[in-house]
């Protein structure tokens, strides 16, 4: 027996924006192919951080889309629902930005700058989002 999946209007709008970010992630993948072919000069540290930023963006946007489905299917509303819906997608932006911005620059960049703090803010957003939705699902 097939069940119909209905998204709330809020989740539909969030999903539409999240899906549009895939184009940015795709562009990042194209940029990485240029880096790996030697067309863009980067240190090994910068290459590693670029890969990590790209990977985190893709995985966390995908998880964020799943979170929308779980929140709506589980009937999680209010603060727990909003935090669960938005927390992981915010983490995707913050963690990726942390990897990219903390390794930017020219010359022999071999360690992150202070913008690495964005990674830790993103990790907090990820944890808060996942825990909020889990609590909402368990309470429902």
Image (cartoon, rainbow, N blue to C red):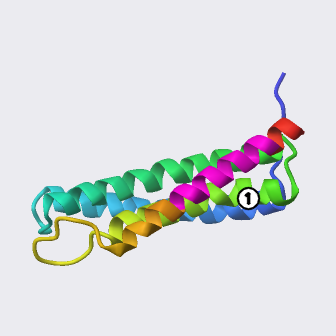
Determine crowd level at label 1: few under 14, some 14-19, many 20+ residues with C-alpha closer than 10 A: many
Q: Is residue 4 visible?
A: no
Left or right of 31 in this view: 96: right
- Residue 35: quarter of image: bottom left
- The segment highlighted magenta reads 122-135
Q: Position of residue 102 (x, y in %)?
A: 32, 70
Q: Is residue 4 above or below residue 95?
A: above
Q: Is residue 46 above or below residue 137?
A: below
Q: Nearer the viewer, residue 118 or 92?
A: 118
Looking at the image, which residue is at 54% across and 54% down?
A: 61
Q: Residue furthest bottom?
A: 106
Looking at the image, which residue is at 65% across and 58% down?
A: 87
Q: Nearer the viewer, residue 139 or 31?
A: 139
Q: The N terminus is located in which quarter?
A: top right
Q: Main secondary structure of the magenta part?
A: helix
Q: Is residue 50 magenta?
A: no
Q: Nearer the viewer, residue 11 or 126?
A: 126
Q: Position of residue 7 (x, y in %)?
A: 80, 51
- Residue 15: quarter of image: bottom right
Q: Which residue matches tag 1?
A: 83
Left or right of 106 in this view: 120: right
Left or right of 78 in this view: 121: left
């Amino acid at each position: 027996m097939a069940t119909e999946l209905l998204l709330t209007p809020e989740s539909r709008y969030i999903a539409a924006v999240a899906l549009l970010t895939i184009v940015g992630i795709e562009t990042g993948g194209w940029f990485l192919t240029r880096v790996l072919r030697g067309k863009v000069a980067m240190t090994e540290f910068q290459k590693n951080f670029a890969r990590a930023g790209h990977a985190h963006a893709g995985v966390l946007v995908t998880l964020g889309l799943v979170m929308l489905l779980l929140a709506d299917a589980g009937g999680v509303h209010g603060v727990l629902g909003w935090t669960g819906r938005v927390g992981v997608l915010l983490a995707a932006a913050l963690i990726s930005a942390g990897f990219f911005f903390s390794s930017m620059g020219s010359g022999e960049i071999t360690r992150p700058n202070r913008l690495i703090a964005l990674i830790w803010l993103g990790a907090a957003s990820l944890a808060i989002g996942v825990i909020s939705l889990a609590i909402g699902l368990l309470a429902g």
